[in-house]
Amino acid sequence: MSDIQSNLKDNSVVTDCSNNLDGLAGVVILAGGASRRMGTAKAMLTLPSGEQLLNYHVRHANKLQVPILIADNGRGFQTGLDVHLEKPNAPIIHIADYGTDVDSNKHDELIKTGGALVAIESALQTLSDLNDSGVSKNVQPSWLLVISCDSLIPATDLWQKLQCEISLAADKNVICLKDDSHLYPLLGLYQLSIEPDLKAYIDSGQRRVMQFIQPLVQAVRFSKEWQKLTNFNTLEDFKQACAALSK
């Protein structure tokens, strides 16, 4: 079919490989979507435990001890978790989408978004700046872990799953999950080195994720159990994901 299909690996469960942090530069949580079908911001959804979804992702990402970037499209979501006190080397940084100047105080009810790539570009730029300043000291090549707020897959589990593919995908710059019929580019790893190419792609007026990553991607099959935890767009979808998580 395509490069995606030819790069597909049959990894139906989390592989037992060394779960170190070498090469992980940071995590970005994509929390700025319009969520029109959901009717409310996905990041602010409440789990059965009483924890908000954004807090859930931040809590798990904090265990990776790298900077946590929150791309909320200027909506000013707060986490309620003081990660700064727990791990000074894992700050929470709110980032604006690339190419936007959003004033959250003037954000109207109709949420406008430039798509996921402008958030990822901003995250890549931020981590590159942190690397240059010495805040992030991981060896190169460094990777950005991308997690969208339509998933309950913990950052720790996602990193463990995808990092096993890094050595097997030496010529690829994006590693992400795939099920039997869909690619999940917003649950993946993006190499920091692609930042100039992504910037040029966005500056040319392009926003389509699949078109950009097609020649760069290594797809990793995930289990049906994980499939139940992601891609929720309605409240009913979210309830089913929460039920699957509790199991």
Image (cartoon, rainbow, N blue to C red):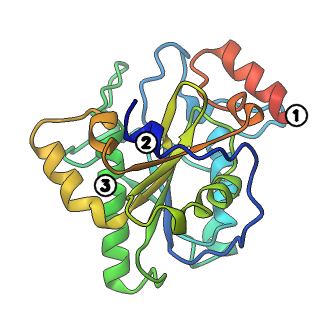
Q: In the figure, is residue 69 to the left or right of 128?
A: right
Disc ID at residue 122: 3
Q: Residue at x 23, y 52 (%)?
A: 198
Distance between mark 3 and mark 1 Cα atoms = 34 Å
Q: In the figure, is residue 82 to the left or right of 170?
A: right
Distance between mark 3 and mark 2 Cα atoms = 12 Å
Q: Position of residue 103 (x, y in %)?
A: 28, 41
> Can residue 68 be seen in this snapshot?
no
Q: In the figure, is residue 201 to the left or right of 45?
A: left
Q: Is residue 127 above or below residue 3?
A: below
Q: Position of residue 56 (x, y in %)?
A: 70, 46
Q: Position of residue 121 (x, y in %)?
A: 29, 53
Q: Is residue 79 above or below residue 181?
A: below
Disc ID at residue 72: 2
Task: List the residue tagged with mark 1.
Answer: 246
Q: Residue at x 59, y 63 (%)?
A: 163
Q: How crowded is the residue under tag 1: few (<14 C-alpha within 10 Å), some, or many (20+)?
A: few
- Amino acid type at circle 1 is Ser
Q: In the figure, is residue 181 to the left or right of 3?
A: right
Q: Earlier in the sequence, mark 3 or mark 1?
A: 3
Label 1: element kind: helix
Q: How crowded is the residue under tag 2: few (<14 C-alpha within 10 Å), some, or many (20+)?
A: many
Q: Position of residue 21 (x, y in %)?
A: 61, 74
Q: Does the residue at mark 1 contact the one at mark 2 (Cβ under 8 Å)?
A: no
- Amino acid type at circle 3 is Ser
> Can residue 34 be seen in this snapshot?
yes
Distance between mark 1 and mark 2 Cα atoms = 27 Å
Q: Earlier in the sequence, mark 3 or mark 2?
A: 2
Q: Earlier in the sequence, mark 1 or mark 2?
A: 2
Q: Residue at x 30, y 26 (%)?
A: 112
